[in-house]
Image (cartoon, rainbow, N blue to C red):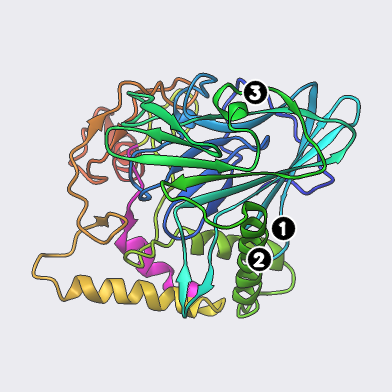
Amino acid sequence: YPATPTTPIDVSPSMSTVDLAVIGNGMFGALVDARGRFVWCCMDTFDGDPVFNCLVNNNSDKTGFYDVVLEDFERAEQTYQASSTVLITTLITSKGDAVEIRDFAPRFVHYDRVFRPFQLFRTVKRLKGDPRISIRIRPTFQYNSTDGYQTRGSQHVRFCGPKNTWRVTTNMPIRRVLEEMPFLVSDEPVIIIFGSDESFTNSLSQVAVEFETKTTNYWKTWCSSLCLPVEYQEVLMRGAMTLATMQSEDSGAFLSSLSMGLPLGPFCSASRDARVCRLLDECLALPVLREVGLLEVCRKFLTFAKEICYREDAPQHSYNSWGSPQDRKREWAPYLAGYRGMGEVHSGGPLLEEARMEGNGEAGDTWNQTAVIYG
């Protein structure tokens, strides 16, 4: 998990890391590094085309990310807001100037149902001094094969691809987004909303404050129903919230991973696309979830499992995020260089295939079987 606010984080901007924070609301998921950079995000579905993907593109500084660049940057501090999924990142210069970045995906009860829009809210405000920043938003489409094209309005930019269109709405001059112009952060917070191509008819500042307050209250109420031991309460509460954000609201299944193509170790090949529900593994975890008070989470998953039992087809080992059998063919993503440049990245494809036994003896067989199931 992200470090506490008092712990400085030493991060090289050119090196990828898996020490990432999770942001999501049950409809999509994103990963943020220690400097507040979105390095992975599948906005339309958990297992869809990643609009931000530099995590598996050798941490590219050209495309596939969304960040805030602070001039004369020295260190960063990062934490989650207590009992909430709001991520707080503080960037500090060598002179002591500082900005705070607040990121969250809205999730709260609205009109007797849970409101989960395909939107990322980011608020940047000045904490100290005169910090000078630039905003870089560089989404890609079709697994980094194209940048698409842009259209603009007075307060928004539309990033258009072959199949999807994403909109950035902000309260700052839109030229600063288009040309990534550096500027001083004033007393008025900078609000940026990235997500579905929908216009806003209300005040952005009011919407941002309202959505963050309702999201925070939702998660605080959600956490109050947990039954956790005192010793590891904070860690288990954070893990429970992360698990809830990775439970697909389309089906009730849990995603094994938000990303793909990460190697299991140094000099290993890239892993397979694990953005699926592993049915057996999750069934075995239900007793533990029930003991800690995740009853609603269990109910959603059991509804998903019951639906599978009533289908005519035989149960499969893995299912996609909306509950259908994982039948996508494995495809190579040639425009993604891999995590730290390690191996080719593939999307889709089964997790279980007949193992190719390249080793000799029982040890080699065990290694290859493990690599097939989890790699």
Q: CA distance from mark 2 to mark 3?
A: 30 Å
Q: Amino acid at mark 3?
A: Pro
Q: Amino acid at mark 1?
A: Gln
User: Which disc number belongs to residue 38?
Assistant: none
**Magenta stretch holds residue 254:** no
Which quarter of the figure is the C terminus placed in? top left
First-in-chain label (2 vs 1): 1
Provide residue 224's location: percent of width, then percent of height. 65, 78
Instruction: Tell me the quarter of the picture where residue 186 sits.
Output: top right
Circle 3 residues within 10 Å: few <14, some 14–19, many ≥20: some
- Residue identifier under label 2: 216
Q: Let me know if residue 236 appears in the view.
A: no
Q: Residue at x 54, y 26 (%)?
A: 178
Magenta residues, start to end: 272-289
Taken as a whole, is the magenta stretch helix, strand or loop? helix
Q: Are marks 2 and 1 in contact (CB under 8 Å)?
A: yes
Q: CA distance from mark 1 to mark 3?
A: 25 Å
- Residue identifier under label 1: 81
Q: Residue at x 30, y 21 (%)?
A: 334
**Magenta stretch holds residue 273:** yes
Q: Determine whether the residue tagged by mark 3 lies in a helix, strand or loop.
A: loop
Circle 2 residues within 10 Å: few <14, some 14–19, many ≥20: many
Q: Residue at x 86, y 31 (%)?
A: 130
User: Which disc number belongs to residue 13?
Assistant: 3
